[in-house]
Amino acid sequence: DAGVTQSPTHLIKTRGQHVTLRCSPISGHKSVSWYQQVLGQGPQFIFQYYEKEERGRGNFPDRFSARQFPNYSSELNVNALLLGDSALYLCASSLAPGDSFPYEQYFGPGTRLTVT
Amino acid sequence: EDQVTQSPEALRLQEGESSSLNCSYTVSGLRGLFWYRQDPGKGPEFLFTLYSAGEEKEKERLKATLTKKESFLHITAPKPEDSATYLCAWGGATNKLIFGTGTLLAVQP
């Protein structure tokens, strides 16, 4: 079975530009979460989506937005890129949103974003 | 402040030398404690979820345990291919995970 897939693998952008990152969850998984991982740190939660609705948001500015499509794939958008947005962006999928307990989350390979 | 702390930050072992990694959390309302393995430049690979104090899970040379305030990842007779960063994460009543900064494990032949 295919795992979580993300595209593109690498991306180089200039400050002020906009970027869109894409994620396809494991077949049968309906919840997608996005994380940002800077070098030397653990992943930091950005968003969770379930059935096209936002279920959770981390402490990130409004420049970050996301959406989920009917096929459960997802996009993360970042506007007005800053140098500090350079990081590995990870997508994780799980069966369900975890309303009372957290489900196992499976991560994709990530998109390495470099902002110059 | 919600926090997950891992120790040590880095650990170097000889092949076959068993040891343990620690994960402690000051977050209240634990519903699940997760362990992941991450190789350089790759996404975290799921290892274990522990849901209640006293629970233990094993996979090959790894065993994870959970108490009320911390979790341990025991590595028995490690091999060089076990070298990676090991991440733990706290999970509450949602799928939002709070990660520690990880333990970088190097196993020398």
Image: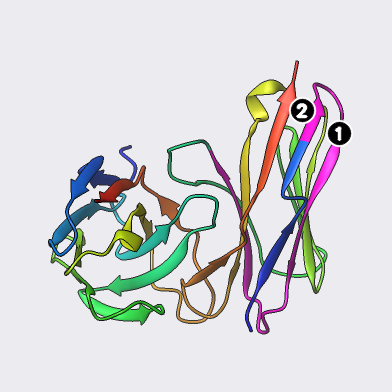
Q: Quadrant of residue B3?
A: bottom right
- Answer left or right for A114 relative to B31: left
| Picture layout, residue B79 above or below residue B25 | above
**Residue bearing mark 1:** B18
| Picture layout, residue B44 above or below residue B32 | above
Tag 2, which chain?
A: B
Q: Quadrant of the C terminus of chain B?
A: top right
- Tag 1: Cα neighbours inside 10 Å, few (<14), some, or many (≥20)? some
Question: Which residue is at a point 35% across and 65% down the rendered structure image?
Answer: A33
- Answer left or right for A4 relative to B64: left
| Picture layout, residue B102 above or below residue B11 | below
In the rendered image, residues at marks 2 and 1 fall on the same chain = yes
Q: Position of residue A11 (x, y in %)?
A: 21, 44
- Residue B78, which numbered label? 2
* Label 2: element kind: loop
Task: Answer whether residue B26 is magenta in the image.
Answer: yes
Q: Where is residue A110 in the image (x, y as percent from the top left)?
A: 34, 47
Circle count: 2
Residue type (three-letter) at the residue carrying disc 2: Pro
* Label 1: element kind: loop
Question: Which residue is at a point 17% across and 54% down the rendered structure image?
Answer: A14
The answer to which of B36 and B40 lies nearer the viewer is B40
Residue type (three-letter) at the residue carrying disc 1: Ser
The answer to which of A66 and A49 lies nearer the viewer is A66
Q: In which quarter of the image is residue B78?
A: top right
Residue furthest to the top in view is: B109
Q: Position of residue A45 (x, y in %)?
A: 43, 69
Question: Which residue is at a point 48% across and 77% down the rendered structure image?
Answer: B94
Disc on the earlier residue, 2 or 1:
1
The answer to which of B82 and B64 lies nearer the viewer is B82
Task: Answer whether residue A39 is magenta in the image.
Answer: no
Magenta-tinted stretch? B12-38
